[in-house]
Image (cartoon, rainbow, N blue to C red):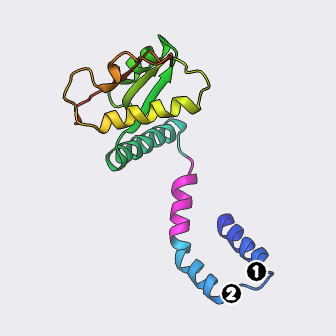
Amino acid sequence: MLVHAGYLGAFLIRFGGALPDTNFRAYVQLAPGVTVLTLALFLSCPRALQVLTLLLWRGAVWRVAQRVWGPERVIVCGPPGEAEDFTRRLTSVRMTGWEVLGTLVGRPPGAPEESLSEVAAAVAAQRAPRGDEDGPGQREREDPFPLSHVRHHRHARA
């Protein structure tokens, strides 16, 4: 009852004390659903049951989102050691929702402008056909840019 009183009060405030007929008819049609939903959400039950319901709901939404949108495609950038460790952790755990496209190791001078070209190169290399095992980003660089290497990760999609 208090929920419905709150909605009606909000209507009165919004419309200056006069309820428009079209809005009120729509509210009356939705009122049974609002009542059922309010009882289901705010009914007293053990906290363990609430937590279990929340966990089940989040798990279901996560699975549906993974099927609909697929994994998040990322490029890991960082200093030597840290970037490889983080990439290893991301790729070692199944079902994380992350797909590592590549790893950029090093810190370019004048970042981020110069590093953007490296990210674009890694993305382009990910999309390019691969004839050699190392990939185009694996070769040592000949310019003074201190980015030590780009590693591309290939994963079989399930």
For the record, the magenta segment spans 33-44
Residue behind mark 1? 15
Tell me the quarter of the picture where residue 111 sits. Answer: top right
Tell me the quarter of the picture where residue 6 sits. Answer: bottom right
Position of 15 compared to 52: left or right? right
Pointer 1 or 2: first along the chain: 1
Identified at 48% across, 12% down, the residue is 80
Q: How many marks?
A: 2
Q: Is residue 34 magenta?
A: yes
> Residue pushed farthest top?
81
Identified at 41% across, 41% down, the residue is 56
- C-alpha distance separating marks 1 and 2: 8 Å
Residues 155 and 126: in front is: 126
Residue behind mark 2? 20
Asked if labels 2 and 1 touch by Cβ distance under 8 angstroms, the answer is yes
Residue 98 visible, this angle = no
Dot 1, how many residues are within 10 Å of its Cα: few (below 14), some (14-19), or many (20+)?
few
Q: Amino acid at mark 1?
A: Phe
Position of 82 compared to 112: left or right? left
Residues 136 and 12: in front is: 136
